[in-house]
Image (tube, grey):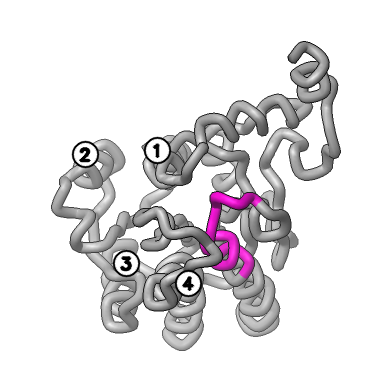
């Protein structure tokens, strides 16, 4: 189950009305319809790399919601290089461009269209999910690390311009490694989840807690937080080593 799924459930629990979207090819599997039924949300198909699809999504969302949008979650990530097991040093550049387009540029396209259409309410909030591989090397994260770096830069840059014009907040949340469908596609992911847990004073943050954090970022309680990359990782991002990890070597 994805973090976005959990965010939808928690937003519904807080009384929010929203729409759901996914790529047309992914919607054929039908899982999103179960979430839509559970949350009472309309599902609008959209290819996140298509300007036409994104414009239609924003238009239909406003029609469904009866006005401008209060919050947007960007939770998209896909790398053909990772899926096909291509090493970073042997990157296929056609695949690389697709990785960046789907996983990062899609945020810029969404924000650009929303900005032009004035689709987000003043003091609205946009949150994009990212990962610490944007700042540090995790070899098997591959070109997704480049995509997350770009994603965070887009959030900062557009956060400035959208903030000046409409007081819209744009942030990224850097989540602990989480056992989702997307995460499980990374080589050695299960082992790394265990390592990260041992490296985090509070342990790994799970999908539900990440969803709750997203909800707080959508709310007026965080209305002056913008252009930030916010670590939600149990302290992992500020730890050099822990006793648990040292003991692994001592015990071996």
Q: Is residue 86 visible?
A: yes
> Which tag, 4 or 1, sits closer to the chain's start?
1
Point out the tag, 2 or 4, that comes first from the N-terminus. 2
Look at mark 1 in the image and give the residue it sits on.
9
* Residue hosting label 3: 61
Please provide the residue range marked out in magenta: 138-149
Q: Which residue is mark 2?
A: 34
- Sort mark 3 into few (<14), some (14-19) or many (20+) by Cα contacts within 10 Å: many
Query: x%, y% of residue 92?
Result: 42, 72
The kind of secondary structure the magenta stretch mainly shows is helix
93 relative to 183, above or below: below
The magenta stretch spans residue 143: yes
Which circle's residue, 3 or 1, is located before the other in the chain?
A: 1
Q: Furthest residue to the bottom?
A: 116
Q: Does 164 appear above or below 40?
A: below
Q: Quadrant of residue 194?
A: top right
Q: CA distance from mark 2 to mark 1?
A: 11 Å
The x and y percentages for residue 77 are 44, 58
- Select label 4 or label 1 by which is in front: 4
């Amino acid at each position: 189950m994805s973090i976005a799924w959990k965010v939808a459930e928690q937003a519904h629990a807080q009384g929010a009305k929203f729409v759901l979207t996914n790529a047309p090819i992914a919607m054929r599997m039908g899982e999103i319809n179960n979430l839509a039924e559970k949350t009472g949300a309309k599902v609008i198909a959209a290819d996140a790399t298509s300007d036409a699809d994104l414009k239609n999504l924003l238009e239909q969302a406003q029609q469904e919601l009866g006005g401008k949008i209060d919050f947007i979650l960007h939770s998209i990530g896909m790398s053909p290089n990772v899926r096909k097991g291509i090493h970073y040093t042997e990157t296929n550049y056609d695949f690389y461009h697709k990785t960046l387009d789907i996983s990062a540029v899609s945020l810029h396209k969404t924000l650009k269209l929303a900005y032009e259409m004035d689709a987000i309410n003043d003091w609205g909030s946009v949150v994009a999910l990212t990962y610490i591989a944007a700042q540090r090397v995790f070899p098997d994260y591959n070109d997704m690390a480049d995509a997350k770096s770009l994603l965070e830069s887009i959030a900062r840059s557009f956060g400035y311009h959208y903030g000046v014009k409409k007081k819209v907040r744009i942030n990224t949340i850097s989540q602990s490694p989480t056992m989702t469908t997307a995460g499980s596609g990374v080589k050695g992911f299960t082992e790394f989840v265990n390592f990260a847990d041992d490296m985090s004073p509070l342990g790994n943050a799970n999908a539900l807690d990440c969803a709750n954090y997203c909800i707080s970022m959508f709310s007026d309680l965080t209305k002056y937080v913008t252009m930030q990359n916010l670590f939600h990782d149990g302290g992992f991002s500020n730890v050099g080593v822990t006793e648990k990890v040292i003991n692994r070597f001592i015990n071996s």
